[in-house]
Image: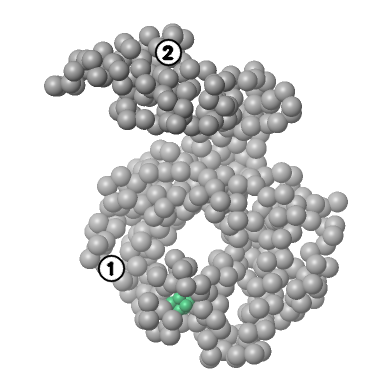
Amino acid sequence: MNALAEPPVAAHAGQVGLPLDLPVRYDGQRITHLSASSVTAFIACPDAWRRRYLLGERTQPDGVMVLGRAVDEALTLLHTDQMAGVAMSADQCLDAYRDAWNTEIESEADRLGINWSDELPENRAFDMGLRMVQVALRELVPRLGTATSVQRRFERRLHPDATWTLIGYPDLETVREQTCWTLEDGTVLEQDTGEEMPTIGVPWDDAPAGYRIATYKGPLDDVLVSRIAGLHLLDELDADRIAERLACELADALPGSKPGPRRTQVRHVVDPPPSKRPDMVPVPVWEFTGRREVVQVAGVADYKMKGKRVTQARADTDVQAGLYLADWALSGRGPADFRFAQVIRDEERPTHAITRTKRNNAQLRAALLRVCSVATQIDAMYRALGPDRPWGFAAPDHWKCRMCDYAPTCPIGSTR
Ligand code: SF4
């Protein structure tokens, strides 16, 4: 039996008064789909949702949006070719980005144009996108595994009589190899390809000296700390002796530094005062178990071109991740995870991150019920307020409110 079928979402949907129809929008057509981004937009600000999805008010995209779409398009082509057995080279992928960029520019010129800013004019936005593609090719693509689908459309009817459906387009569905470490109590710690070794928190006094050194965040130069830890792990030498030796090396290498104070400083790293010790020291899992195996893991990956890394807390509550994993579970395809494959925007040095999240069955059901709840609120607000009166605003401290395209003409946004 499907994991979400019992108890069925449709039965729970009754608790939130699931509407069978959604309102009629600006073009006279009834709304027939809700997507993860539409649901997220409504949760953030019902009135921004009303203006965008019900009234069809379009706003100018900015340079960041254009480059994000062009990067996404180039990577989509790369994975589509991979699935067809064609290996796209890095240069070809960069060419695909250039093509996608030009297509975006031309198609936006036919609509509202692009809102280029002084901080990120067109030429610099284009160059930043090129660098972001390079980072994605080098750091993300090798870690995402083999694509089994690219931009697959899914559609779910959450009640058999509803005239609207939930839709989604996961960037990638993949299968990959992943290392699992099993502890004596049966706990399994997982290590994604290319990611750091999982660690276990150990009280300071019980942790091996080398890991205590690596953990200490005292006044020492970071380079020295990491060199001490690295040497200890590689050479299995006594931490005190290594610390002393490196202190002398560093003292010699730094112009004007005196060996005496440096040596003293390093000794403090080995045994810092209790007030400066962290309670727990992260120790790599390999110190606790040799039970390591490589397993095949399936999952969903979504590229994000963001200004900030998606935190674990945000990933664990993200609407899109929950809905895409719910669709996966409803397909009866077994366990899966969701990974945000991120290129973090920076004009000179874009970086990368992968944030991974999972959902249990109760959380998957809750994700679907959240869609039902949003549909219920849309229906209720339309009945109570109609299409032309404001539907309620974003929370005062919501980040979206500061970035919102509707702010200049919003009674709330224009006052902030
Ligand atoms: S400015 Fe704030 S309250 Fe107004 S539509 Fe935008 S997000 Fe909503």
Q: Is residue 197 visible?
A: no
Separation of residues labelled 2 and 1 (CA atoms) = 55 Å
Report which residue position mark 1 lands on: 116
Q: Residues within 10 Å of mark 1 (few under 14, many from 20)?
A: some
Q: Position of residue 29 (x, y in %)?
A: 61, 85
- The amino acid type found where label 1 is placed reads Trp
Q: Secondary structure at mark 2?
A: helix
- Which circle marks residue 239 in the picture? 2
Q: Position of residue 377 (x, y in %)?
A: 66, 78
Q: As drawn, is 306 to the left or to the right of 337? A: left
- The amino acid type found where label 2 is placed reads Ala
* As drawn, 289 above or below 22: above
Q: Position of residue 216 (x, y in %)?
A: 42, 28
- Residue at 53% x, 40% y: name it: 144
Q: Nearer the viewer, residue 352 or 82?
A: 352
Q: Is residue 374 visible?
A: yes
For the residue with label 2, is its CB less than 8 Å from the closest atom of ligand 1?
Answer: no
Q: How is the image coloured?
A: one colour
- Which circle marks residue 263 in the picture? none
Tell me the quadrant of the picture where the C terminus can be found: bottom left
In front: label 2 or label 1: 2
Q: Secondary structure at mark 1?
A: loop
Q: Position of residue 243 (x, y in %)?
A: 36, 15
Q: How many marks?
A: 2
- Residue at 64% x, 26% y: name it: 181
For the residue with label 1, is its CB less than 8 Å from the closest atom of ligand 1?
Answer: no
